[in-house]
Amino acid sequence: MKRILLATVAAFTVTGAWAEYPEKPITIVVPFSAGGPTDKVARDFAEAVRKPLGNATIVIENVGGAGGTLGATRVAKAAPDGYTLLLHHIGMATSPALYRNLQYKTEEFEYLGLINEVPMTLIGKPTLPAANYAELLKWIDANKGKVNLANAGLGAASHLCGLLFQSTLKVDMTTVPYKGTGPAMTDLIGGQVDLMCDQTTNTTGQIEGGKVKAFAVTTPKRLTTPTLAKLPTLDESGMKGFNVSIWHGLYAPKGTPKAVIDKVNAALKVALKDPDFDKRQEALGAVVVTDARTSPAEHKKWVAAEIDKWGPVIKAAGQYAD
Ligand code: ASP
């Protein structure tokens, strides 16, 4: 009897404790450098999601390196208490095929919901002597063996996009890896690297400001954001079928209590309908996912499908890291 009573009290205590969640600041780990595309999405999202979480304090922690795998590892091994979350992109699905010694397993995460989809753009340093995509191809041809391409490491979206670009062109470029395309963008603007394929959340402002040259978008259809609408698709420019768009989702370490998962997921759904968040995403060329895609079950299904889609492409390209 006494034991039953104790167990009942313990059960109530646990439920009660999670009912107050969050009681302290939540850290969202971004597995890339500050100032880059995923960081920008995370900071906007944090602002929108903190309100439905009772005006919680949210701290963004940038853990860049190894194409996002260092940050993902940090969260996979963190306490499953809802206070360390991960905002990651397509790398969640590509890293398992790319890294032979990945320090975490995809199964080590709870899924809290998809956030948005983000197209990419092919951009170049401002001094690159090409005014459009056709001229860029001529310049690449004339500079074979000398062209370099920035990316955010193996498994990053910029890596994936650059890889497809090179293999479709059948041209090898020297890749220059960074901890995120935030610092890569600084070097591109400074002319230290030639080209980069990066998310519109990072490139729209730089294209608008004339800081970089923009040559094409990676989606099958042209984009509607005013700055980007004039850019041709790679598909219409001769790379038939070229289509790279990335997505972001929110994760917690495996074993996070269901009450916390439900609370954060409910807050995510509210955040995605926040007009300020929506407007900002639209202005940066990103598309917030529909409500139907935000459940943890749909998120998990999506990641599994993306692993199935990209695994064979990556293996066929012979890409891997130890
Ligand atoms: N999303 C990465 C970043 O925020 C870049 C990438 O995936 O290419 O830097």
Image (cartoon, rainbow, N blue to C red):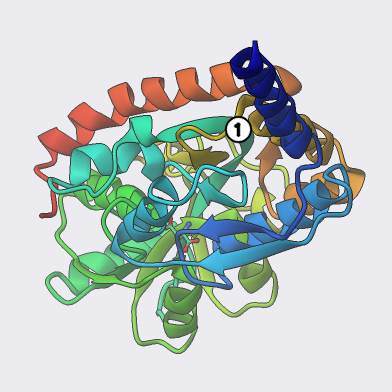
Q: Quadrant of residue 17?
A: top right
| Residue 264, above or below 211 | above
Q: Is residue 241 visible?
A: no
Q: Quadrant of the N terminus?
A: top right
Of residue 82 and residue 34, the one placed in the foreground of this image is 82
In the rendered image, the residue lying farthest to the front is 2
Q: Quadrant of residue 130?
A: bottom left
Q: Considering the numbered disc 1 on the image, is that residue within a helix, a strand or a loop?
A: strand
In the rendered image, the residue lying farthest to the top is 1
Residue shown at the point (59%, 31%) measured from the top left: 257
The crowd level at tag 1 (other Cα within 10 Å; few <14, some 14-19, many 20+) is many
Is residue 311 found left or right of 220 in the rendered image?
Answer: left
Where is residue 100 drawn, in percent x and y? 12, 45
Residue shown at the point (39%, 20%) measured from the top left: 305
Is residue 261 found left or right of 176 in the rendered image?
Answer: right
Where is residue 12 drawn, in percent x and y? 74, 25
Where is residue 141 drawn, in percent x and y? 20, 65
Residue shown at the point (72%, 25%) measured from the top left: 9
Q: Is ligand 1 less than 8 Å from the beta carbon at label 1?
A: no
- Mark 1 = which residue? 112
